[in-house]
Amino acid sequence: MTTIKHVGVVGAGQMGRGITEVCARAGLRVTLCDVTEDRARAGLAGVADSLLKAEKRGAITSEGRAHALAGVSVTADLSRLSGADLVIEAAVEDEQAKTALFRQLDKVVTDPAAVLASNTSSIPIARLAAVTGRPESVVGLHFFNPVPVMPLVEVIPSLQTSKATELRVLAFAGETLGKKAIVTQDRAGFVVNSLLVPYLLAAVRMVSSGTATAEDIDTGMTAGCAHPMGPLRLADLIGLDTVAAIGEALYEEYREPLYAPPPLLRRMVESGLLGRKSGQGFFNYQAA
Ligand code: 3HC
């Protein structure tokens, strides 16, 4: 089992940036790819900013920060990932976009032993593996937001993922990145989102029905159940578009009403109220 030294990350949004940061901090070479150079460079700027914050609070040394940053390069050319040992796709949560990417990755990543992983939160890995000629090397590797803080990674082998691939990514997540890994079956939502998303959607329904204010619903769960943040701030952190997309995927898989995104959530997404990343969701972040 060869050690993973070069990681390609596809998608320079909040998850791609976080994954890039933890890989770079683990001393790996990372190539961060997005559809335009500008987006990839913005992703790198976000990683640099987060590393600086980590240095300021004493989580890494100045040398550690410089070393991590020096290991990251950016590109808009997917073929620059050709030599990667592991590619982690963290693009938009859209099945068509992801299958198109896996088709391309299958062509450009030259090492047949390289692992093609997806950070999808809800799309079955089997569907992504099916468009490649190497389903045994395709696996789910699902990180949690904020990636530098959350210890968990879900490892999702599909029915065709080889045991060698599963063990390789388990070692990568646990030993190389120092994360806590759990293995879950290839079902939409895996373990965490299957439990979390219905809870978040229930909180949105409470806002709609006027049960309590957003502030009081969140206080209910932070002060009443010791959650680090309430469901509506958490939905804002994840991104309301992402929460809605996961709900749709879960509903498509199980047809259970508790997974269906409520009208208020759909209207907020359609209005560009996406949570923290757009500055406004259930709460306002303009000044943050
Ligand atoms: N990036 C890096 N570090 C961050 C960060 C970020 N975006 N946000 C917070 N941190 C760090 C802080 O710097 C601080 O570090 P320190 O302890 O070394 O000083 C530490 O995290 C705590 O942060 P704060 O003191 O600023 O704030 P809180 O104590 O309120 O913690 C939080 C913030 C870590 C986000 C906490 O509220 C929390 O754990 N929230 C729940 C998050 C959660 O449930 N995530 C899972 C989402 S589900 C998901 O991602 C799956 C997907 O598929 C949808």
Image (tube, rainbow, N blue to C red):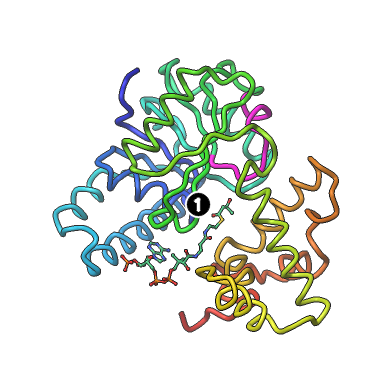
The x and y percentages for residue 160 are 61, 18
Residue 6 in the image: above or below residue 90: above
Say left or right for 123 vs 167. right
Say left or right for 121 vs 31. right
Residue 150 in the image: above or below residue 1: below
Instruction: Read off the magenta span.
Output: 119-129
Q: Quadrant of ligand 1?
A: bottom left
Report if residue 147 lies within the magenta region: no
Identify which residue, 217 or 91, lies in the foreground.
Answer: 217
> Is ligand 1 closer than 8 angstroms to the Cβ of mark 1?
yes
Q: Disc count in the image?
A: 1
Q: Amino acid at mark 1?
A: Phe
Report if residue 126 lies within the magenta region: yes
The x and y percentages for residue 126 are 66, 27
Q: Disc 1 marks which residue?
A: 144
Identify which residue, 224 or 203, lies in the foreground.
Answer: 224
The x and y percentages for residue 209 are 83, 77
The x and y percentages for residue 85 are 37, 26
Residue 83 in the image: above or below residue 153: above
* Residue 231, image quadrant: bottom right
